[in-house]
Image (tube, coloured by chain):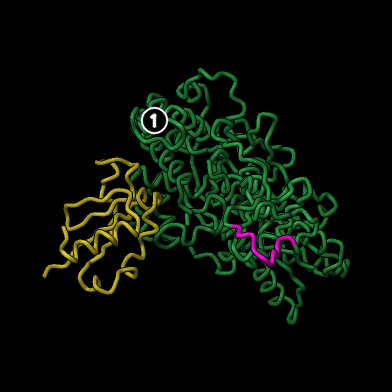
Amino acid sequence: MLNGSTFIRRELMIRIVRAFDDGTLETELDKIPVKLRPKNSISSRCCVYHDRAILKYRLMALLGVSVEDETDETKALSAYYAEKAWGGGTNETKPKTPLSVCGPACSGCPDAKVVSTPNCRGCFARPCVYNCPKKAISIVGGQSVIDQSLCIKCGKCITACPYHAIVKTSVPCEEACPVGAIRKNEHGVAEIDFARCIFCGKCFAACPFAAVMERSQLVDVLAAMKRGEKLVAMIAPAAEKQFPGKIEQLLAACAKAGFKDVMEVALGAEKTTEHETAEFIERMEKDQKTFMTTSCCPAWVNLVGKHMPDLIDHVSLTPSPMIYARELVKAKDPDAKTVFIGPCVAKRSEARRKDVDYVLSFEELGAILAGRKIDVIACEPWPVERPANPTARNYARSCGVTDAVLDEATSKIPGFKLNAKQINGIDRKTCTMVKLHASGKIPVNFLEVMACPGGCQNGPCSLS
Amino acid sequence: MDKIKVEVCCGTACYLLGAANLMSLEDMLPENCRGRVEVEAKTCLELCEKENLGGAPYVRFNDTEIMAQATPEKVLARISELVEGVA
């Protein structure tokens, strides 16, 4: 979704690509904040100087540098650029954590609470008073007042009030995080506890001050292209409808932008379907009462690993479509370097574990295309050997994996029955649902979990 | 009477910076503007380089008038003005 945060991020990305191609990036980097916020221009925060300071941190994150790890405030962006070994696709050059919080951008939102507003008319019925389970609401001087020491933020008064006079204030990042990994530190500034973080990217998408930033590999990819690394673009199934035009045109646009070869990750998804179905059938033959859960969503895999260790044995051992796509690329050319392009933050953590060389978001790919003046709709469709199977392209939607596995299983075993459930988006409530399934209270044998509601197509770095 | 020409830049830069919201402009036209306007999705008009990247997305009216930071609301309002002959 486009808003001020996405706009500035995309604008900076396009500027980076243009400057890189002009050969002026090193000198241009430190000028960009001033060029975007010259003196006497309109500022987005208190003044243009605060804006510039934050733009510098945005550019740091776009260079892949962790904003939290800054030790020398006087260090120029050009120095960060000059000291880093760009490209190579090794784990040393990949950001250790895909997210970074920029303290100076964080607004330090006040703690969430339920408050009564002047819309209250001090009515006769007083449904707020009657519905509050903690007796936290009283009427003082004709207005409802909530005793914060008693309030449990259940929200019953919010729904009960006919004047919409009671509201809940929020800390958007904390509210979005399904695992309580982002909190304000002793300075009142948001901080991510990376031991808990599952890299779902929900805080990144939620923060209205855009204080959570992604550590990018954009410049790595640009440098690798320039050095002549054989980069292969692997386009995630979620690419459909991200850009105008067809998938084949997007593949052609990538080739035009400088990738040596291009492929749909959906071809890898076909292999995931095949192996995951076989694995599922085997597990069911061994134990009919057990259940298996999907392994294609990396945020879900991170969630199990960090917060639900009891479930690890239930996670499918079948590699994700990205990993099979990587195998296909390497089988064709062992020297090729793989670039996964998708809407996902957590794929950056999976790529680190599983030797995918680079990860770009659709935004970053868009910036490369924009910087190189490539319009997807103006490209002739790429001559693919064959288009990926529709069920494989459907992996980007909730239910997509379930449908693919069911399809495959029924083709092997006629009349095959699947007791499947889908967790369509990870949040605190659905985490409880997962536990209910795991404990057998709600029976299931195939549990599909997607961190993003609706599936990858609505990922934190999607364009539409 | 000549139709009013509205060119929406669908170059990748404009697309990323907001033109995606302008794709269904034609369906949003008010009754009195239908048939009076010709909306065209164009490949990059190169205004993001000549003018300023931060001004994207760009829309061009009748080959000459350029609108920066175009939104459906702004474009529709300008179309109405042009149709009514206000300016």
> Residue A306 appears at what percent x and percent y?
77, 45
In the rendering, at what x and y percent does residue B24 appear?
36, 65
Chain letter behind tag 1: A
- Magenta-highlighted stretch: main secondary structure? loop
Q: Residue at x 73, y 47 (%)?
A: A179
Above or below, comparing residue A367 to residue A322 in the picture: above
Residue at the extreme left: B1
- Write down the residue under mark 1: A32
Q: Residue furthest bottom?
A: A415
**Looking at the image, which residue sits at the far front?**
A141
Q: Residue at x 19, y 52 (%)?
A: B65
Q: Amino acid at mark 1?
A: Ile
Chain letter for the green colouring in the rendering:
A
Q: Is residue B65 visible?
A: yes
**Percent position (x, y) of residue A377?**
35, 59
Quick check: B21 above or below A364? below
From the viewer's perspective, is B34 left or right of A367?
left
Q: Which chain is yellow?
A: B
- The one nearer the camera, A334 or A168, is A168
Which segment is the magenta one?
A120-129
Query: Tag count in the figure?
Result: 1
On the image, the x and y values in percent for residue A319 come to 69, 54
